[in-house]
Amino acid sequence: MTEDDDTTRDASTFVNPAEQRTSTFASWLFDQLDDEEWGPLAREVEGDERFPEHGNRNIYEGYFETYPEDMQALFARAWDEYESSN
């Protein structure tokens, strides 16, 4: 803003992008436990201590590589949804 700009900006109108983004795929997925589409995947891995808390797509693809193809496909769709929502 310049000195001659008489508009003021209310700090409450600014959104911190970091606050909008869910920090990890795992936290996003566990937020979906009751979701009809993503809930089955979230519930499948919920209690698994080996499930990565964070990582890129390759990390999660490695985790899901031993799962049946339908769960791998569900993961792929969930990852795409996670990325598009962040």
Image (tube, rainbow, N blue to C red):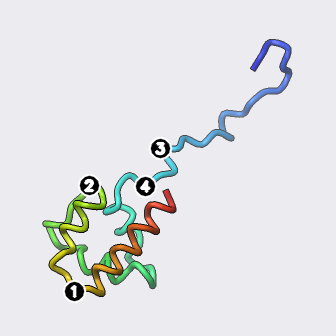
Q: Residue at x 41, y 75 (%)?
A: 77
Three-letter residue code for mark 1: Pro
Q: 10 Å neighbourhood of mark 3: few (<14), some, or many (≥20)? A: few
Q: Secondary structure at mark 2?
A: loop
Q: Residue at x 46, y 68 (%)?
A: 81
Q: CA distance from mark 2 to mark 3?
A: 17 Å
Q: Secondary structure at mark 4?
A: loop
Residue 23 rendering spot, x and y as whole percentages: 38, 52
Residue 33 rendering spot, x and y as whole percentages: 37, 76
In front: 68, or 15?
68
Residues at discs 4 and 3 in contact (Cβ within 8 Å) = no
Q: CA distance from mark 1 to mark 3?
A: 34 Å
Q: 10 Å neighbourhood of mark 2: few (<14), some, or many (≥20)? A: few
Q: Earlier in the sequence, mark 2 or mark 3?
A: 3
Q: Earlier in the sequence, mark 2 or mark 4?
A: 4
Residue 9 rendering spot, x and y as whole percentages: 74, 30
Residue 10 rendering spot, x and y as whole percentages: 72, 33
Which tag is nearer the camera, tag 2 or tag 3? 2
Q: CA distance from mark 1 to mark 4?
A: 27 Å
Q: 10 Å neighbourhood of mark 1: few (<14), some, or many (≥20)? A: few
Three-letter residue code for mark 2: Gly
Residues at discs 1 and 2 in contact (Cβ within 8 Å) = no
In this rendering, the answer to whether 36 lies above or below 1 is below
In front: 70, or 5?
70
Q: Which residue is mark 2?
A: 55
Q: Which residue is mark 4?
A: 22
Q: Which residue is mark 1?
A: 68
Q: Which residue is mark 3?
A: 18
Q: Is residue 11 left or right of residue 64?
A: right
